[in-house]
Image (tube, rainbow, N blue to C red):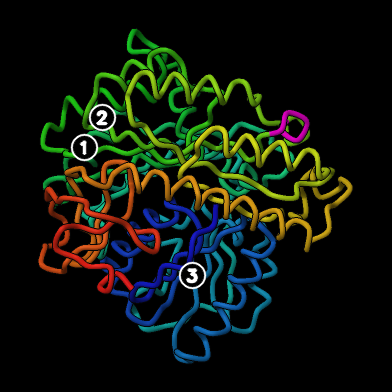
């Protein structure tokens, strides 16, 4: 799902964690090629609104830096390269399968001070069989590092265009994952997030379902065993339909695997899930959450939810809202449905936009109540927190902590939690006034 834009020198990243990681690879390619006259916009295509934001960003960057080459890549560029190439501001459009190759990303005149004419370099993503083998030494300005374990998706959810932008499921070789984690830990990262488009599908393309269980479970166990200095391992979005016995076993027995699971739910009403072509039911989700909490006391959950999916009635929405509350989902990532041309859902009877936005607001408010209960449950406890900024940190359950500003980013420190305010925990050395 789309996050806020991440702006770093010469690269603007829109969208998911995978885009963030790929931007770091492109930064390395930019450095190797000696590029100092280009701005890369790494786009998202999860909604039509995401594409609109990409075009808006391109125009703004050209106004701010009129002499820069504008290179557009990412999912939106993969899906409709001609649309971006037609923009006067754009010099080059590069697809997802090509963007990590410096020669394709920058063109034959890279580093020679010459601009290529507007050009399109976009391969057929469905023909790509492997993942890129790049390793990054660190993530610019981040204490939490991301490691790609797979690319693409084999599902056909009716609302989603991402398989067309990212291609089929492709698993990164296990030894390459471990090598990348070792490199990041050596560079000082204490926490790593395993990320991809559908990480729970890891190994389904290679038949990796050995004695360890699912492919993802193997990745978790091998990574923790091979990198003892890795303090924290997190997982990005998980398909609840793919979590099996082995996963819950490793959750129970691997304390360095953080007790914070983000589930790709999208809805919590069975009819809506069926029309989305999701592979789980509401009962399945209840089972996953119950098993996880049994395996690891205190496990918390995030969830992606779409409000106002086509054909969603008031009753269906009420069911999703009730289930979200009953499931005690602490971190809700909610989006009002946005029509995505080219998907089956775009041809279904649409819910009015104002209704979808109102439903999204209700879900977010419900999530805030549940998160507040979680924060309250931590008051009076001592927590190990990863310092992200001098005045900000995260607990193992990803709860935000307002700090006193004296700790170094990238360190893990123990703090006493004395309260919470404005959605953040307070430590013994902060005050309610300081958190405002």
Q: Is residue 338 left or right of residue 229?
A: right
Query: How far across and how far down the image is residue 433, in percent?
Result: 27, 73
Q: Alpha-carbon neighbours of circle 1 within 10 Å: few (<14), some, or many (≥20)?
A: some
Where is residue 280? Give x, y as percent. 63, 25
Q: Earlier in the sequence, mark 1 or mark 3?
A: 3
Numbered range of the magenta stretch = 269-273
Dot 3: what SS? strand
Quarter holding residue 37: bottom left
According to the picture, the residue beneath numbered tag 1 turns out to be: 179
- Cα separation, mark 1 vs mark 2, equals 6 Å
Q: Is residue 318 above or below residue 372?
A: above
Residue 180, x across and y down, in percent? 24, 41
Which element carries disc 2, helix, strand or loop? Answer: helix
Determine the secondary structure under disc 1.
helix
- The residue at the point 27 percent across, 32 percent down is 257
Comparing 163 with 381, the one in front is 381
Magenta stretch holds residue 288: no
Q: Is residue 350 left or right of residue 206?
A: right
Residue placed most toward the observer, 386 or 202: 386
Which residue lies at the image location 49% right of the left edge and 72% below the top edge?
71
Disc 3 target residue: 41
Residue for badge 2: 175
């Amino acid at each position: 799902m789309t996050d806020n834009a991440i702006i770093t020198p010469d690269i603007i990243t829109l969208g998911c964690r995978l885009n963030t990681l790929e931007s770091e690879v492109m930064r390395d390619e930019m450095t190797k090629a000696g590029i100092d006259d280009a701005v890369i916009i790494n786009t998202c295509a999860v909604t039509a609104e995401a594409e609109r934001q990409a075009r808006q960003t391109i125009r703004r960057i050209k106004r701010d830096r009129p002499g820069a080459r504008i290179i557009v890549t990412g999912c939106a560029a993969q899906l409709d390269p001609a649309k971006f190439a037609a923009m006067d501001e754009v010099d080059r459009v590069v697809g997802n399968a090509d963007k990590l190759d410096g020669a394709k990303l920058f063109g034959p005149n890279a580093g020679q001070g010459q601009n290529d004419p507007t050009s399109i370099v976009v391969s057929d993503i469905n023909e790509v069989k492997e993942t890129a083998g790049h390793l990054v030494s660190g993530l610019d300005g981040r204490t939490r590092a991301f490691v790609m374990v797979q690319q693409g998706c084999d599902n056909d959810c009716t609302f989603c265009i991402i398989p067309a932008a990212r291609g089929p499921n492709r698993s990164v070789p296990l030894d390459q994952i471990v090598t990348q984690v070792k490199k990041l830990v050596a560079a000082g990262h204490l926490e790593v997030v395993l990320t991809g488009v559908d990480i729970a599908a890891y190994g389904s393309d290679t038949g990796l379902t050995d004695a360890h269980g699912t492919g993802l479970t193997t990745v978790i166990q091998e990574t923790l065993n091979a990198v003892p200095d890795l303090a924290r391992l997190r997982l990005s979005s998980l398909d609840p339909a793919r979590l099996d016995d082995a996963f819950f076993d490793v959750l129970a027995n691997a304390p360095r695997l953080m007790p914070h699971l983000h589930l790709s739910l999208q809805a919590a009403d069975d009819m809506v899930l069926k029309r989305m072509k999701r592979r789980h039911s509401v009962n399945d989700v209840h089972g996953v959450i119950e098993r996880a909490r049994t395996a690891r006391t205190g496990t918390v959950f995030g969830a992606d939810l779409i409000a106002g999916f086509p054909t969603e009635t008031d009753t269906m929405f009420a069911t999703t809202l009730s289930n979200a509350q009953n499931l005690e989902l602490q971190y809700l990532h909610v989006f009002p449905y946005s029509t995505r041309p080219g998907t089956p859902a775009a041809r279904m009877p649409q819910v009015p936009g104002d209704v979808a936005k109102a439903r999204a607001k209700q879900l977010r408010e419900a999530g805030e109540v549940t998160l507040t209960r979680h924060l309250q449950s931590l008051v009076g406890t001592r927590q190990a927190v990863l310092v992200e900024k001098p005045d900000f940190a995260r607990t193992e359950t990803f709860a935000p902590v307002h700090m006193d500003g004296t700790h170094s980013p990238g360190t893990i420190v123990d703090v006493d939690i004395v309260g919470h305010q404005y959605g953040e925990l307070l430590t013994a050395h902060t005050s309610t006034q300081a958190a405002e």
